[in-house]
Structures are given as C-alpha cells and as structure tokens.
Image: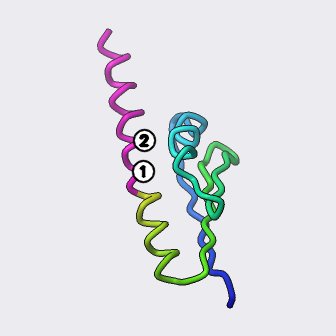
Amino acid sequence: MTRKRIEIRTTHANPDLVARSVSPDNTPQIRTDVEDNRVVTTIERDSMGGLRTTADDYIVNLTVATSVQTANKNLDNHE
C-alpha cells in the first residue's frame, strides 16, 4: 500500500511558539518543523481517510495555537 502524504505550510508572527504548541499532539506519522519563518507540518498515513482525519485534527490544533498566540499578543499590547 502506498502511503499518503500532505505538507501544510503556514506563516505566523512567532512560528517557533506555534510549532512548539502543536508538536505535543504529533504522532509518529506527523512531523512539525520551522523553516523560513513558517510552520511546516508533514503528515503521512496509510489511507486517504486517515490522512484527511489527521490533517483535520492538526488544523484544529493549529487554529487554537494561533488564536492563543494572537490573544496573548493582544494582552501584551494592553499592559
């Protein structure tokens, strides 16, 4: 069976913080790095359904990490 693969690249004000935030949820099939101020996550799964489910879970985690970063930045600006 051929493994399915997706690479998700996103840009953030603090990509290291976002990468550290999402990495604890990584399984052996998920790798998250920072390259050129971007969070780069590669997901490999045996099935397209598994790839879609894992990518969806990752995007939810990424959205939360980004929202927390934005909220924290906004709090810092109000102090």
Question: Which x, y percent locates residue 42?
Answer: 63, 63
The residue range painted magenta reads 60-79
Q: Which of the 4 image quarters holds residue 53?
A: bottom left
Residue at far top of view: 79
Q: Position of residue 69 (x, y in %)?
A: 42, 33
When asked about the image quadrant of residue 40, the answer is bottom right
Asked if residue 35 is among those painted magenta in the image, a careful observer would answer no
Rendered image quadrant of residue 70: top left
By secondary structure, the bulk of the magenta-drawn segment is best described as helix
Foreground: 77 or 60? 60
What residue sits right under mark 2 in the picture? Answer: 65
Mark 1 touching mark 2, by CB under 8 A? Answer: yes
Q: Nearer the viewer, residue 36 or 4?
A: 4
Foreground: 64 or 36? 64
Q: Amino acid at mark 1?
A: Asn
Looking at the rendered structure, the kind of residue marked 2 is Ala
Residue underneath mark 1: 61
Does residue 46 lie above or below 57 as drawn? below
Callout 2: SS: helix
Where in the figure is residue 24, as x and y percent of width and height? 55, 44
Please give the name of the residue rendered at 68% of the width and 90% of the height, measured from the top-left corner.
1
* Residues packed near mark 2 inside 10 Å, few (<14), some (14 to 19) or many (20 plus): some
Residue 14 placement (x, y as % from top left): 54, 34
Q: How is the image coloured?
A: rainbow
> Relative to 49, is 30 above or below?
above
